Amino acid sequence: MRIVIVGGVAAGMSAAARARRLDESAEIIVLEKGPEVSFANCGLPYHVGGEIADPEELLLQTPQTLRASLDLDVRTHHEVVSIDPVARTVRVVHPDGQDTIAYDALVLAPGAVAVRPPVDGLDSPRVRTLRTVADAVALRSAVESGARSAVVLGAGFIGLEAAEALAQEGLRVAVVELAPHVLPPLERELAALVRAELVRLGIDVHDGVAASRIDTGADADRVVLADGTALDADLIVLSAGVRPDTAFAEAAGIATQRGAIVVDAHGRTSVPGIWAAGDATVSTDAVTGAARPVALAGPANRAGRLIADDILGAGTARAIPTAVGTAIVRVGSLTAALTGANRATLDAAGIGYRTLHLHPNQHAGYFPGATSMHVVVHVRAGDGLLLGAQAVGADGVDKRIDVIATAIRAGFAGEDLIDLDLAYAPPYGQAKDAVNLVGMVAENVAEGRLRLWYADELDEVSQNALILDVRSRAEYARGHVAGALNVPHTELRDRIAEVTEAAEGRPVRVLCAAGVRSNIAHRALVGHGFDSASLSGGMQTLEAWHDADISRILVTEGALAC
C-alpha cells in the first residue's frame, strides 16, 4: 500500500508515524511544500523573544531522522498543486521540476495560511508573519539588528505572544486589534485583565480599531489606524488569523465549507480514498454542534493518528472526537486559558445558559504567594450541563481549565465538580479546590438557593432596585456604586429594618468584592422575605466588565459609609 500525505508538522506527521507503526510494509510518502516537515510551531514566539536561543531546538525531526527511525520518504519543498481522484494521483511541483505520484490512500494536512486583511501597504518588506521557523529567525534577526519599534496586527494568541516577546527584548510595541478587545475568544471581563497586563508590560494597545494603511518609509514604516492614530514601526507582525490552505483540494471536487475541508468522524472527505485533518478541516464543536476549523496542535495530532487507524485498521478505528477547543496563553505574569463555548458561540447556537464568576485563590490563602484566579463558567439553563470555562491568573489556571475540559468531555453538569477528588496540599490548592467551588456555586444556582445578577445589568438595577453593598466600610469608602447602601454583611441581621426602609418595596441587589459575602447576605435577605440577588463575581467582575467606564460608575471621592 502507498500512503501519500500532503503536509507535515502536526496532523500529517502524526498520520505518517502511526501508519508506520501499524504497517511495516506500507510505502509512506510525505510531501511538504516548506523547508521543515516537523517543527515546534507553538514555540516560534519564544525564539523571537530569546527564551529559545537556538532555532535548531524548534526542529523536532528532519527527513533524515524520519527515514532512519520510521522509514518514511519525506520530501520537503514539494508542493501538491492538483489531485486527480479518478486516477488516484497528485501532481507535485518541486525545485527540480514536477512529478505525478500515485496513491492508494491520500491524507491532506496542508494546514492554514495567514489572513491578509485589506490594508494598503501590506506588501512592505517590514511586514512579517510568524508561521514558520524562517519567520521566527527573521524576526529574531531584526531584533538583534537593532529594531526599536514594532506593530503587531492582531491580538489573538500568536499576536500576543509575539508582542510580549518583542517587548521583553526592549522594543516599543503596539498591538492593533479590530475586535472590541484583545484575545477575542476570551470573555470581556477577563480580556480586560489581559489588556491591563499588556499595558503593564509597556505595550500600547489599540483595540476596536482597524489598520487602514501602511506607509513605507526609508528607515521605518508607519501604520495608520482607522481612527487616525499613526504608529511608527521598524517591523510589523501580521497575525490577523488564518484561513485553510485548500485551493488545490477544492479544485479536485473535494467538498469544503467556507474553504475548510468537510470530513466525517473518521477524517474521510467526500472523495473515496482521501482523508484530511488539521487546520484545513471543518471540526464539529463539542458543545454547540457548530462546524468550524479548529487551529490547535492537540486536536490536529490526535486526528492524524486516528486517520492512520482508519486507513489501516479495517473498520476498527475510534472516531475523531469533536472539538472542545481548549487553549492557553502566557501574557506577562498572567496565564489566560479557555475551554468549551463562550457567550458569543452559545448565543449564536441559541443555547440558554447561566454564567458563574468566581475569584478563588490558586492555593491555600494562609500559604505564602496566594493569588486570585478569575474564573468564568457557563452552564446550560435547566440541567446545569457544563458548556465552557475560562480563567485568568498568575498561577494555577492551567490545572483548573484542564480539569474542567475533562469534565466537559465527560458530560458533567456543573454541580458534578463538587465530587471531584483533586490533589490538595497548601502549596498546590485548597481543601475546597477552585474547581470544587465552581461546582458548589453551580449547584446553588441550579437549586435556586443562589440567584445572580450581572455586571451588564447595572444601569437597569440602579434604576429599579436597591443596591446593597455588604463590604466593609473601608472598602466601600475606596469606591462604590453611586446610590448603594453600605451594610457590612456581619451587621445585616441587626440592621434589616434599615434595609427594608431603604428598599421601599423594591428588589434588593447585593454585591461584595468577589461574591462570597454577598451570597451570605442574599440568603439572610431571602430568609426575611426580600426579592434578592447576588452580583456574580462581585466588584472584581463589575470593574473588569466596565473597564474604562468604571470611573463614571464608582464614587471614590468624598464618600461617606453609611
Image (cartoon, rainbow, N blue to C red):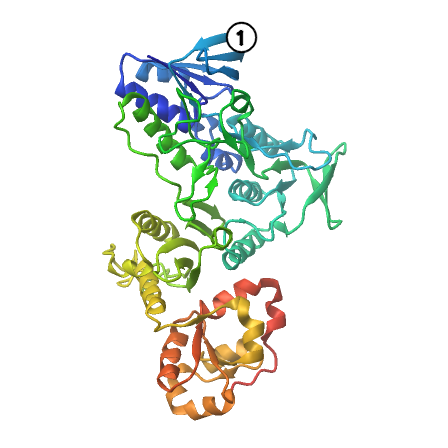
Q: Position of residue 455 (x, y in %)?
A: 52, 68
- Direction from residue 116 to residue 457 in the image, left or right: left
- How many numbered marks are there? 1
- Direction from residue 450 to residue 485 in the image, left or right: right
Mark 1 is surrounded, within 10 Å at the Cα level, by few (under 14), some (14 to 19) or many (20 or more) other residues, namely some
Q: Position of residue 327 (x, y in %)?
A: 43, 44
- Direction from residue 106 to residue 406 in the image, left or right: left
Q: Position of residue 293 (x, y in %)?
A: 48, 37
**Camera sees residue 134:** yes
Residue drawn at x 51%, y 51% is 348
Relative to 174, say whether 545 is above or below.
Answer: below
Residue drawn at x 31%, y 51% is 411
- Direction from residue 408 to residue 452 in the image, left or right: right
Query: Which image quarter holds the N terminus?
Result: top left
**Camera sees residue 77:** no
Quadrant hosting residue 463: bottom right
Where disc 1 sits, the SS reads strand
Camera-nearest residue between 445 and 129: 445
Relative to 160, say whether 256 is above or below.
Answer: above
Camera-nearest residue between 265 and 48: 265
Amino acid identity at mark 1? Gln
Mark 1, residue position: 98
Q: Position of residue 435 (x, y in %)?
A: 32, 58
Camera-nearest residue between 266 and 75: 266
Relative to 477, say whether 124 is above or below.
Answer: above
Quadrant hosting residue 149: top right
Residue drawn at x 69%, y 37% is 118
